[in-house]
Image: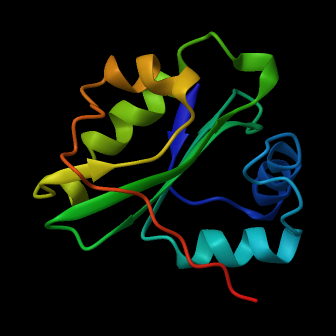
Amino acid sequence: MQPIYELHDDQISTLWRLYQNEWWTQGRTLEETKQCIKGSQICIGIIDGSGELCGFARVLTDYIFKAVILDVIVSPVYRGDGLGDQLIELIVRHEKLHNVKHFELYCLPEFQAFYARHGFTTDVGNVALMRYATP
């Protein structure tokens, strides 16, 4: 397994297929997936020996105060093999993010223990997630 920091078209297509199996990304189009990758400051993939994408995460950041980790996803074939752990470590140790004060993400309650192992906490004071959905 090897990390990559740019995805070629076949890997983006694989990511799009992975997205179709998850509640938070299901229904994204291939074109939207391409735009999503293009609009993210940092993308990290993990590939196997044949170059097949096995895991992925992306980051939106200002490089100093905040870095928001999004779309952490591992192929069902490789779940339980530590690729999610590897993705998080690659992000928080990324050289371009070394000055970031807060890494943030949102997740379902069943994933809190996974992220807590990496130092994430739900102790964020009275901060609430708010959303505006375009009509």
Measured as percent of width and height from the top left, residue 65 is found at 15, 65
Please tell me which residue is depicted at 85% across the width and 53% down the height of the picture: 26
Q: How many marks?
A: 0
Q: Residue at x 53, y 27 (%)?
A: 109
What colour scheme has been applied to the protein in the rendered image? rainbow
Residue 97 occupies quadrant: bottom left
Residue 25: give x, y in percent of width and height.
Answer: 76, 54
> 120 or 41: which is nearer to us?
120
Q: Quadrant of the N terminus?
A: top right
- Position of 59 with respect to 83 (left or right) is left
* Image quarter of residue 93: top left
| Residue nearest the observer in this picture, 127 or 23 | 127
Of all residues, the one furthest to the front in this rendering is 126
Residue 7, quarter of the rendered image: bottom right
Asked whether, in this view, residue 72 is left or right of residue 134, the answer is: left
In the picture shown, does residue 127 fall above or below 23?
Answer: below
Look at the picture and state if 66 lies above or below 78: below
| 78 lies above or below 84 | above
Residue at image location 34% in from the left, 31% down from the top: 89
Q: Is residue 71 above or below residue 61?
A: above
**Residue 132 image point, x, y percent:** 57, 78
Q: Nearer the viewer, residue 30 or 106?
A: 106
Q: Quadrant of the C terminus?
A: bottom right
Viewer-proximal residue, 25 or 58?
25
Q: Is residue 67 left or right of residue 43?
A: left
Residue at far top of view? 80
Q: In the current view of this chain or complex, which residue is farthest to the bottom?
A: 135
Name the spot of residue 22 as percent of width and height, x first: 79, 41
Q: Residue placed at 55% from the left, 78% from the top? A: 39
